Amino acid sequence: MSPEESQLLKGLFDRTKTASGTPRDREAETLIADAVRDQPAAPYYLAQAVIVQEKGLEAAAAHIKQLEDRIHALESGGSAPQAAAQGGFLSSIFGTGQPQPPAPAPAPAAAPGSWRNPPPSDVRVAAFCRARSAPPQVSPAACCLPIR
């Protein structure tokens, strides 16, 4: 386990410690305790799923912020003068002598709601998920369990 992974796990359990004073549903608590007795590895996979999903949400939030910043720049006319200085819309074909920023790559299609094909919101999240799949008999996608 890397130091970053250790810190992520410690942070997760620190948060659960601070939440321990809140009221809990007895029926849900019993159901969870029974499930953990039946599947002792469940907390491992649940912690893994929570961390992977949190990282996915962070990546999505960062991407949304980036897109909002781009929209704001376009609405305020921030990039229109720049485009004109670079030669306009045909400059990508004929060139302007200035490097063009790369266009964002389209996201590959994934089956919506499919936990075996999670949307690639962040390549690092998918790599973490694959690298942390537990025993060899478990498929790499099994670390990203769906929450129902």
Image: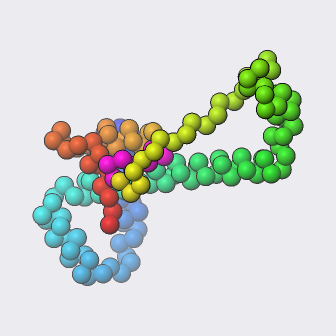
Residue positioned 32% across, 48% down in the render: 116
Q: How many marks?
A: 0
Q: Main secondary structure of the magenta part?
A: loop
In the visual, does 138 lie left or right of 46?
Answer: left
Residue positioned 35% across, 72% down in the render: 20
Residue positioned 45% across, 45% down in the render: 109
Q: Is residue 11 visible?
A: no
State whether residue 139 is above or below residue 45: above
In the visual, does 23 lie left or right of 81?
Answer: left
Q: Is residue 41 visible?
A: yes
The x, y position of residue 69, in whole percent, is 71, 49
Instruction: Please identify the residue farthest to the left as the structure is shown.
Output: 38
Residue positioned 34% across, 53% down in the render: 115
State whether residue 118 is above or below residue 28: above
Out of 61 and 44, give the one closest to the viewer.
61
Out of 111 and 16, give the one closest to the viewer.
111
Q: Is residue 15 magenta?
A: no
Out of 56 and 97, give the one closest to the viewer.
97
The x, y position of residue 107, in whole percent, is 51, 42
- Look at the image and give the residue range highlighted in magenta: 115-122
